[in-house]
Image (cartoon, rainbow, N blue to C red):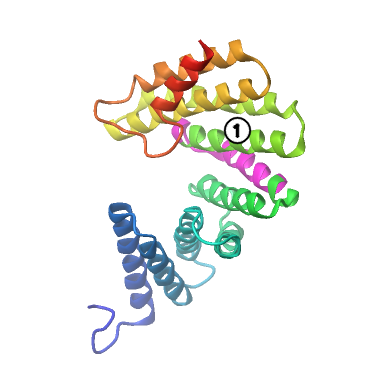
Amino acid sequence: AALGAIPPPSARRRSALLTRAGRVHTARYEESGDPAELVRAAARFEQAAPGIPRDAPAHAALLAEWGEARLRRALLGDGTREERLERVVAAVRVLRGCRAETPRGDRAFAHRLVLLGRGLMARHRLTGDRVDLREGEHLLGLAAQEAAGPLESARCLLELGQARFEAAQTLGRPARLDEAADAFRAAADAARRAREAADSERAAAESATLGAQAEHWRGMTYEAAGRPRAAREAYGAAHRAWGLLPPGTRPTVEPTPRQTAQRLAELA
């Protein structure tokens, strides 16, 4: 209603309203799961961008929200290969601009590196381009170094481990599996520190989930390396970490507690 008011809002006010409208669509997606809401969110953020000076921190922040909305839509994985690639390319384009505008030391620096790294890894899976694989892994490693606090560190290290695991599989270099396992172990350690310092049930739940998923991925890595005993120990650690979740909490992404239990049963 405010956007359609007469007289129309100023350019700066209009950008602020468009940004808020984009956030509403993002929240609607989280409630409904309707991909169209992410498309609408990205469109609103795109409309808001021209009204914000490029040298203002708010412009980089808007690019992050715009790129993340596009990336979330792209990662849903529906449509033809060409459609999926088009969505990923569009997201990477915005996120690369966001990174260029975000100075090192900014509190959002690590998160924005992760977004771009995630987009590059997604593009690699669609095209097989090893340049994207190398850059994606590099950015995720840099994000892990720049993370502010153990919770963000756990998030970054988990994605770094996944990138290294994928690099080992893609490049046919089993030695890279050791590097992946190291990243997953570090992610689990960071998640443990985050859980001990958590000041809310939500933070405690996320920390426990990250720790369990990192241990599960470590188990997968050891399985790929032909080390079933080490894999079983890692899955056992994941099982114990799942037990730290607050009652009623259910993970929304894989791996899940059930998958961990299945791997433990099969390796028993």
The answer to whether residue 130 is left or right of residue 102 is right
Q: How many marks?
A: 1
Side of 134 where 196 appears, left or right = left
**Front residue of 179 and 257:** 257
Q: Over which residues does the magenta segment extend?
A: 134-151
Main SS class of the magenta portion in the image: helix
Residue 19 in which image quadrant: bottom left
Q: Is residue 194 visible?
A: no
Q: Is residue 42 visible?
A: yes
The image shows residue 210 at horizontal and vertical percentages of: 44, 30
Residue 144: image location, x then y, percent: 58, 37
Q: Residue at x 65, y 37 (%)?
A: 166
Residue extending furthest toward the bottom? 7
Seen at 55% across and 46% down, the residue is: 114
Identify the residue at image location x=49%, y=26%. 190
Up the image or down, 184 lies above or below 252; here it is above
Asked if residue 138 is among those painted magenta in the image, a careful observer would answer yes
In the depicted structure, whether residue 189 falls above or below residue 61: above
Q: Amino acid at mark 1?
A: Gly
* 259 horizontally vs 234: left or right: left
User: Is 1 placed above or below 156 here?
Assistant: below
Residue 6 in picture, x, y percent from top left: 24, 89
Q: Nearer the viewer, residue 98 or 133?
A: 133
Question: Badge 1 is on which residue?
Answer: 161
Task: Please report the residue visible at 42 percent of the width from the left and 39 percent of the height from the top.
Answer: 253
Measuring from the top left, give residue 264's x and y in whole percent.
48, 16
Tell me: residue 90, above or below residue 169.
Answer: below
Which element type, helix, strand or loop, lies under badge 1?
helix
The answer to whether residue 211 is magenta is no
Mark 1, other Cα within 10 Å: few <14 / some 14–19 / many ≥20: many
> Which quarter of the rendered picture does the N terminus lie within?
bottom left
